[in-house]
Image: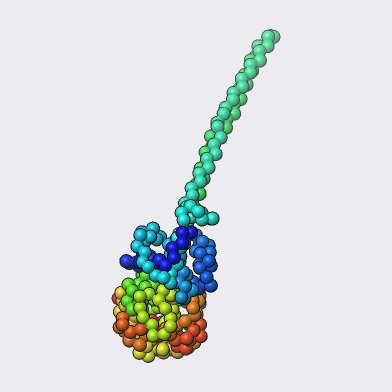
Amino acid sequence: MSVMNGRRFQCANTTCLPFNTVRVSNMRNCQMTCLAQIFCEAASFYTTTSNCDLFSYISNQIGSMSADTNTVTMIVIASTRIPSEPTTTSTTTTTSTTSSSSSTSSTTSSSSSTSSTTSTTSSSSTSSTSKTTSTTTSTTAPTTANGLLPGLQDYAIAVIGNGYHGIQMIRYSSVTITGNIFVINYPIVYLSGTTFSTTYVNNAWYAVHGGCGNANGIAGCTGVCKALSKNYFNMTTDCGTGFIGSFATYVNPDRAVYTSADTVSTPWTDYNQASTCSNPMFYCTCSS
């Protein structure tokens, strides 16, 4: 990998957002994490947080780097990865058998008071056979979407947001869509370019606190809806404890956040661990 100290991607749009963020102990582990994922083309390690952003499809972003003394960016050198980058392979096998035929004729003649002639003809043939088998192997990139996909996703889908209130991407446990109503269960958000009233930082995934439907919960749900270019409809008034499913794959460190007002200038505030926090956002409902 090519290592650039003090440099990070300067994204003019969301096409260079990371497809995953993990917490690692050092830069070396960030490198290894990227190289272990076949679609990872670059990684950025943040020395202040130990977060490691993983990127794919960054060829158009290499020329747009900005200075950041707390970031080390590493780019995979083409054709040097073991195993190699994914390709599409097609194999064709053709088997044929050549036809053949034979013919045998015999005649026997004898002379006596009665003359007879016997003629026997036999023939055989083998028909031609041709068989073609084609095998195509293809692979796909990490899953992102420009819109909500219904059903149970267990956080596997990263929906690209518009950056409202710092929300660049959204993952969720499941979504139910009825007409123009979208019920998003247990949303988590990737925050970048926003402010925090606590020590937590940008460029990381956070669970969203629901507050049993109080003003903080409504503000957070409204931010989620607006980041999806939708309108706030309603949200859970249920209380409870902790997020469910595979959220911890992305929410690392394990933290939940809330915001006290639906304004981009209002900071996000820490609200304990996502796995055990009180009053998680069971669902947030948006309308289009």
In the rendered structure, the answer to whether residue 284 lies left or right of residue 1 reads left
Task: Relative to 274, say whether 73 is above or below.
Answer: above
Task: Relative to 7, say whether 181 is above or below.
Answer: below
Q: How far across and how far down the image is residue 247, in percent?
A: 48, 76
Task: Relative to 203, say whether 90 is above or below.
Answer: above
What residue is at 52 percent from the left and 70 percent from the top?
A: 26
In the rendered structure, the answer to whether residue 107 lies left or right of residue 19 reads right
Q: How far across and how far down the image is residue 213, in percent?
A: 38, 89
What residue is at 61 percent from the left and 25 percent from the top?
A: 122
Quarter of the figure with the C terminus: bottom left
In depth, the one of 20 and 158 nearer the eye is 20
User: Does the image show residue 38?
Assistant: yes
In depth, the one of 275 and 132 nearer the eye is 275
What residue is at 59 percent from the left and 25 percent from the top?
A: 102
User: Does the image show residue 180?
Assistant: no
Q: Residue furthest right?
A: 112
